[in-house]
Image (cartoon, grey):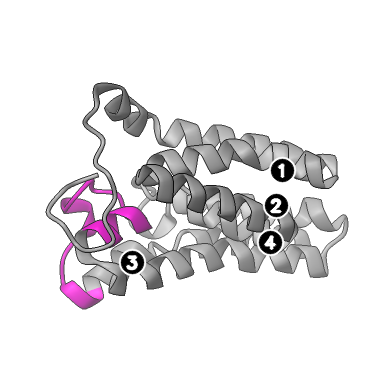
């Protein structure tokens, strides 16, 4: 019963479209109608700047972290419970209930939050990989894909349980799939580099 409740909580937290809500509250605009149309951090930051981008990335991370950590603390087997609750949050982020299951975000920050809850060393190393790739190439999409693919490898290197490794592999596949349009733009040379300051470019 507790396990099912955590999974439901994970999905409901994941369904909170913070990028959409924050922009609507502060700017009275629909983030889905500007930039790339995505409700995630990259589009919010690129379109409205860091003052909205930072809160959105923190809240998108927390909605993966909270159910995953609760699963680790309250339900056994710990890693599996945390992973499933966190995966439910990622599913909610992708297809949020509160947006009537319309397209949501690409799960990167929420996935990071899940790993902070169940495998902190994987999360920290994955974050380092993301930062290096981002600073070097200035493509948020490439940094997300590279760090996502690194997750199962990092989990193996740190000796985490099979459940964490498998989850990392599935998360990597999901991240690559959700960035398929970015990959197409990269092949065509039309993917925009990221700028910390607000620009008129689109994702």
Of mark 3 and mark 4, the one earlier in the sequence is 3
Q: Which residues are magenta?
A: 25-46
Q: Nearer the viewer, residue 77 or 152?
A: 152
- Please give the name of the residue rendered at 70% of the width and 38% of the height, measured from the top-left corner: 152
Per the rendering, the mark at residue 122 is 2
Q: Residues within 10 Å of mark 3 (few under 14, many from 20)?
A: many
Please say if the residues under marks 1 and 3 sit with CB atoms less than 8 Å apart.
Answer: no
Q: Position of residue 42 (x, y in %)?
A: 33, 54
Residue at mark 4: 68
Of tags 1 and 4, the one toward the viewer is 1
Q: Is residue 89 visible?
A: no
> Circle 3 sits in a helix, a strand or a loop, which is it?
helix
Residue placed under numbered mark 1 in the picture:
154
- Tell me the CA gap for discs 3 and 2: 24 Å
Q: CA distance from mark 1 to mark 4?
A: 19 Å
Q: Nearer the viewer, mark 2 or mark 4?
A: 2
Query: Is 80 situated left or right of 203 in this image?
Result: right
Give the numbered dot on residue 53.
3
Q: Is residue 59 above or below residue 193?
A: below
């Amino acid at each position: 019963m507790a396990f099912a409740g955590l999974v439901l909580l994970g999905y409901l937290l994941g369904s909170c479209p913070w990028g959409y809500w924050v922009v609507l509250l502060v700017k009275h605009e629909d983030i889905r109608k500007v930039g790339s149309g995505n409700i995630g951090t990259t589009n919010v930051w690129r379109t409205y700047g860091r003052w909205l981008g930072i809160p959105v990335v923190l809240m998108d991370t927390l909605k993966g972290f909270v159910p995953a950590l609760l699963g680790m603390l309250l339900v056994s087997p710990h890693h599996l419970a945390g992973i499933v609750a966190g995966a439910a949050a990622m599913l909610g982020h992708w297809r949020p209930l509160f947006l009537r299951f319309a397209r949501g975000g690409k799960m990167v920050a929420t996935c990071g939050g899940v790993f902070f809850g169940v495998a902190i060393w994987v999360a920290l190393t994955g974050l380092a990989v993301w930062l290096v790739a981002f600073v070097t190439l200035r493509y948020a999409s490439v940094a997300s894909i590279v760090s996502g693919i690194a997750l199962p490898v990092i989990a193996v290197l740190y000796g985490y349980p099979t459940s964490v490794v498998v989850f990392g592999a599935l998360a990597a596949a999901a991240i690559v799939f959700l960035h398929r349009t970015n990959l197409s733009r990269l092949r065509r040379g039309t993917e925009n580099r990221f700028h910390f300051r607000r620009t008129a470019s689109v994702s």
